[in-house]
Amino acid sequence: MTDSMWAYQATSGHRTGTDLSGFKVEATDGGIGRVSKYSDTVDSSYIVVDTGVWILGKHVLLPAGTITSVDAAQRRILVSRSKDAIKNSPEFDKNKHTEDAGYHEQVGTYYGTPRG
């Protein structure tokens, strides 16, 4: 896991303080859901995506390093992973994601390094 996995890429267009709640999220091969929660915390930035019925209402944690583009005007976020990669990601754990460094390591390792 690299520290940059938990930071927004400079080229993503993300601006700290932008409310990402409700933004549509698109994988490399189509829509995956909407942002239900997000963080701009240094070295721990992420979005939580509510996938709705796509994968039975699962919530997934995506490190900010997976985000390639934030379009505030269109309220849309593009990520550099496929729907299958996101579907098969570690289960989002709302109790561990803020308190368990091992959980962040597991998710970061799964997604690898940022790709643009």
Image (spheres, rainbow, N blue to C red):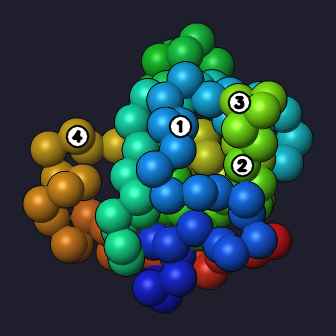
- In this rendering, would 42 be left or right of 14? left
Q: Which of marks 3 and 2 is nearer the N terminus?
A: 2
Check disc 1 and report its element: helix, strand or loop: loop
Residue nearest the observer in this picture, 21 or 3:
21
Q: Is residue 95 among what the camera can see?
A: yes
Q: Which of marks 4 and 2 is nearer the N terminus?
A: 2
Please give the name of the residue rendered at 22% of the width and 72% of the height, measured from the top-left corner.
102
Please give the name of the residue rendered at 64% of the width and 57% of the height, measured from the top-left corner.
14
Residue wearing tag 1: 20
Please give the name of the residue rendered at 47% of the width and 18% of the height, measured from the top-left corner.
57
Residue 104, image x, y percentages:
32, 67
Residue wearing tag 4: 94
Crowd class of label 2 (few under 14; some 14 to 19; many from 20; radius 10 Å): many
- In this rendering, would 113 be left or right of 43? right
Check disc 4 and report its element: helix, strand or loop: loop
Q: Is residue 82 among what the camera can see?
A: no
> In this rendering, which labeled residue sits more in front, label 4 or label 3?
3
